[in-house]
Amino acid sequence: MLVLFRKTPILGAFLAQVVALPVVAAVTAPLSTSVERLPLIAIALVLQGLIAAGITRALGLARWWLLIAFLFPLAMGSAFLIGNLPAWPFGLAFLALALVFSNTTRGRVPLYLTNRETASVLTDMMRDRGATRVLDLGCGLGGVVRALYGEGRRARGVENAPAVYLAARLLSVLTGKGEIRRGDLWKTDVSQEDIVYAFLSPAPMAALWQKLSTEMKPGSLFVSNSFAVPDIDPDEIWELSDSRKTRLFLYPIGAKD
Ligand SMILES: C[S@@+](CC[C@H](N)C(=O)[O-])C[C@H]1O[C@@H](n2cnc3c(N)ncnc32)[C@H](O)[C@@H]1O
């Protein structure tokens, strides 16, 4: 059960609020005759946040969920208290967030981007290896794909967040650089690539290595930005001198396990 909540933390966060609710109601009900309405609501919201945060901790969720669990009731309560807020900005914000981040709840890979320095190092790496095909798994806005495309190199990217994919595709079409496809990285054919690049999160790395080590061709290379494959020694680790001190983990395919 705890594994489920660690894999899909939003379920744990939801459960924490639901469980906290009757506890807060039971604790604050006796106060309703003696405490003013506003202070009572404030007490209830803070209590709700504290209990929910405690539950998310007990469920083993990452530390930032504590903050979310604590702040969520306060934000909801404030919105209700202010009253008469127009609904459309919230709807619009929800839609925009869903189109960019809806895949994050399942895949646990949010959007952040490879910087120029890293893309330039990757270009040099391709030149040095004489690599002509590269695939960015979860290509975000497609910056890496566009940077690596050219001089006879074919660069492709796959992305499953709808709005992010659309932006990447548009930029690719407008610049005439690279190929962006909407799809799931887990279902993407990697067998023809010289280099597969990924900048994801710790969550998928073990399963990703399972896929890549069996499906990529011998002599090809998997490069992971920032996240190592657990229990597998990379052949090399490149530490870049960019501001975030990017580390690239290099895993040759067919070399060793
Ligand atoms: C950290 S970003 C990296 C973006 C890009 N590769 C870069 O380095 O600039 C990871 C991207 O992977 C995408 N992603 C996550 N899970 C995915 C999946 N199962 N299939 C395709 N894309 C996915 C996310 O939407 C996000 O845009």
Image (tube, rainbow, N blue to C red):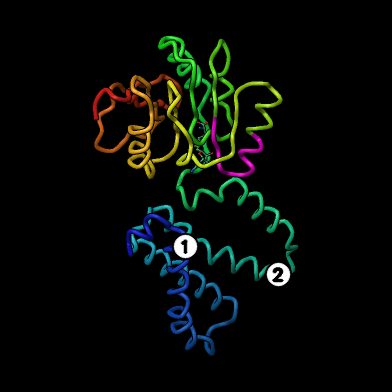
User: Which contiguous range is marked in magenta?
Assistant: 157-167
Instruction: Residue at 44%, 32% (x, y): give it.
Output: 198
In the image, which disc is placed on residue 19?
Answer: none
Residue placed under numbered mark 2 in the picture: 83
Q: In terms of depth relative to the viewer, which is nearer, 42 or 75?
A: 75
Q: Secondary structure at mark 2?
A: loop
Give the image quarter of residue 47.
Answer: bottom left
Q: In terms of depth relative to the viewer, which is nearer, 235 or 71?
A: 235
Residue placed under numbered mark 1 in the picture: 70
Instruction: Residue at 50%, 75% (x, y): give it.
Output: 44
Task: Check residue 164 for magenta coloring.
Answer: yes
Find residue 174 and report its horizontal and vertical position in percent: 71, 25
Instruction: Residue at 70%, 54% (x, y): give it.
Output: 92
Residue 256 as seen in the image, left or right of residue 224: left
Amino acid type for the residue under numbered disc 1: Phe
Find residue 208 and report its horizontal and vertical position in percent: 38, 38
Q: Secondary structure at mark 1?
A: helix
Do tag 1 and tag 2 residues touch (Cβ < 8 Å)?
no
Instruction: Residue at 45%, 15% (x, y): give it.
Output: 131
Give the mark, 1 or 2, whose residue is nearer the N terminus.
1
Find residue 234 and report its horizontal and vertical position in percent: 28, 27
Task: Check residue 60 for magenta coloring.
Answer: no
Residue 13 vertical position relative to residue 161 in the rendered view, above or below:
below
Crowd class of label 1 (few under 14; some 14 to 19; many from 20; radius 10 Å): many
Residue 140 vertical position relative to residue 76 in the rendered view, above or below:
above
Amino acid type for the residue under numbered disc 2: Gly
Find residue 169 and report its horizontal and vertical position in percent: 65, 32
